[in-house]
Image (cartoon, rainbow, N blue to C red):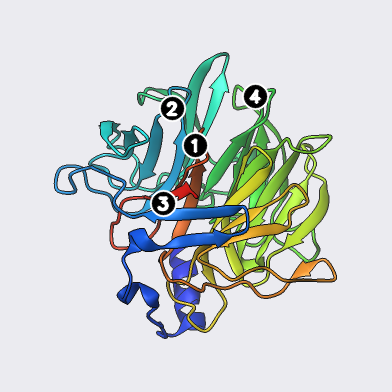
């Protein structure tokens, strides 16, 4: 499903209902989100960037590099990549060539950080240095036999295995996961659309999860409100149901998996996002801006927004001090929010 069709279908499903929340009567910085051991204080004014000089459109994704800097990817071609310190001071910017900048992954390659940028408009994935030098370009995967032209390939995310293999999620295209070696040579593909648990609908995100005995892939199937688990060779092993939650990419840090939820299926569907935190068993242990998860027969009941702090949260970055940074899509060109543990 491409971005245009996603918006069209979203509008049809949602209507125009929007229920204002408690933020009309309360400052954002007074808000504590989450529950139990995962509670955070909201800071909506983290970014100190001058919006007139360094604007953003959609704040799609964020990562932290080995120097401790926070790197933001936006589809604003005046400054596609914005690099901050943890206090929100803008250190530098680069990038004018990524009009459809969407996915941002960081990988430490032989001691050096490299970035993988997915561009929806250019139908390509770019490997770059953290300073913006393009090291490799991956074009549409014609080797799979599933694509006849570049326009059919609309990559949304990548992840990189320990051995350097690159996995690309074609989340707005045909929903395949395409695996390459470190030099960009095609290995295999899996997922795609179809009937059965091994298939995907809106494969928006992907990550490597090393928390178990063996590494596995966690893949978003956003329109199915689920994560799906695969072996590193692409065999489906489990589906993690998250009813009502349109989850974006999974982010693993320490013992937990973090994920922005773009929106929910609840009555206040429009701008109804929140952030989920899952444990090693993929159970929800906190919801930032959402309801407390209740499980019945191992499956959570419907998940939905309870405090409309976020509009369309698109990604979560977890830094080395356990602070969270939330990037938002289609949210009035706002800069990322910071959430500090309490």
- In the picture, which quadrant includes the N terminus? bottom right
Q: Verify CB contact (< 8 Å) between mark 4 and mark 2.
A: no
Q: Verify CB contact (< 8 Å) between mark 1 and mark 2.
A: yes
Q: Residue at x 82, y 34 (%)?
A: 214
Horizontal arrangement in the rendering, residue 222 relative to residue 22 (left or right):
right
Horizontal arrangement in the rendering, residue 189 relative to residue 63 (left or right):
right
Q: Residue at x 81, y 50 (%)?
A: 236
Residue matched to label 1: 319
Mark 3, residues whose alpha carbon is within 10 Å: few (<14), some, or many (≥20)?
many
**Residues at marks 4 and 2, CA–CA distance in whole angstroms:** 22 Å
The numbered mark at residue 164 is: 4
Horizontal arrangement in the rendering, residue 58 relative to residue 265 (left or right):
left
Residue matched to label 2: 68
Residue 116 in picture, x, y percent from top left? 49, 33
Residue matched to label 3: 327
Mark 4, residues whose alpha carbon is within 10 Å: few (<14), some, or many (≥20)?
some
State the residue in front, 102 or 19: 19
* Residue at far left of view: 52
Residue 163 in picture, x, y percent from top left? 69, 22
């Amino acid at each position: 499903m491409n971005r245009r069709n996603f918006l069209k279908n979203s509008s049809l499903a949602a209507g125009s209902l929007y229920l204002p929340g408690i933020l009309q009567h309360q400052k954002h910085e007074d808000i504590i989100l989450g529950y139990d051991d995962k509670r955070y204080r909201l800071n909506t004014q983290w970014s100190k960037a001058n919006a007139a000089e360094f604007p953003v459109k959609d704040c799609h994704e964020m990562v932290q590099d080995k120097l401790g800097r926070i790197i933001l990817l936006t589809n604003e071609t005046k400054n596609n990549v914005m690099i901050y310190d943890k206090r929100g001071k803008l250190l530098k910017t680069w990038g004018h060539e990524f009009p459809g900048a969407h996915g941002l992954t960081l990988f430490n390659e032989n001691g050096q950080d490299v970035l993988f940028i997915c561009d929806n408009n250019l139908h390509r994935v770019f490997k770059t240095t953290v300073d913006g030098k393009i090291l490799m370009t991956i074009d549409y995967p014609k080797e799979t036999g599933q694509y006849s032209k570049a326009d059919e390939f609309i990559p949304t995310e990548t992840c990189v295995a320990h051995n350097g293999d690159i996995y690309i999620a074609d989340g707005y295209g045909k929903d395949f996961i395409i695996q390459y070696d470190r030099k960009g040579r095609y290995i295999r593909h899996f997922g795609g659309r179809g009937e059965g648990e091994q298939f995907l609908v809106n494969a928006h995100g992907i990550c490597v999860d090393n928390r178990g005995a063996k590494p596995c892939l966690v893949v978003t199937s956003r329109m199915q409100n689920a994560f799906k688990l695969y072996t590193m060779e692409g065999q489906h092993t489990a589906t993690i149901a998250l009813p009502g939650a349109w989850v974006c990419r999974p982010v693993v840090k320490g013992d937990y998996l973090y994920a922005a939820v773009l929106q929910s299926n609840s009555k206040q569907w429009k701008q109804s996002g929140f952030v989920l935190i899952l444990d090693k068993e993929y159970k929800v242990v906190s919801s930032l801006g959402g309801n407390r998860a209740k499980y019945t027969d191992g499956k959570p009941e419907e998940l939905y927004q309870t405090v409309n702090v976020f509009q369309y949260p698109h990604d979560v970055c977890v830094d080395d001090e356990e602070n969270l940074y939330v990037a938002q899509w289609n949210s009035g060109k706002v800069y990322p929010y910071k959430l500090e543990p309490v």
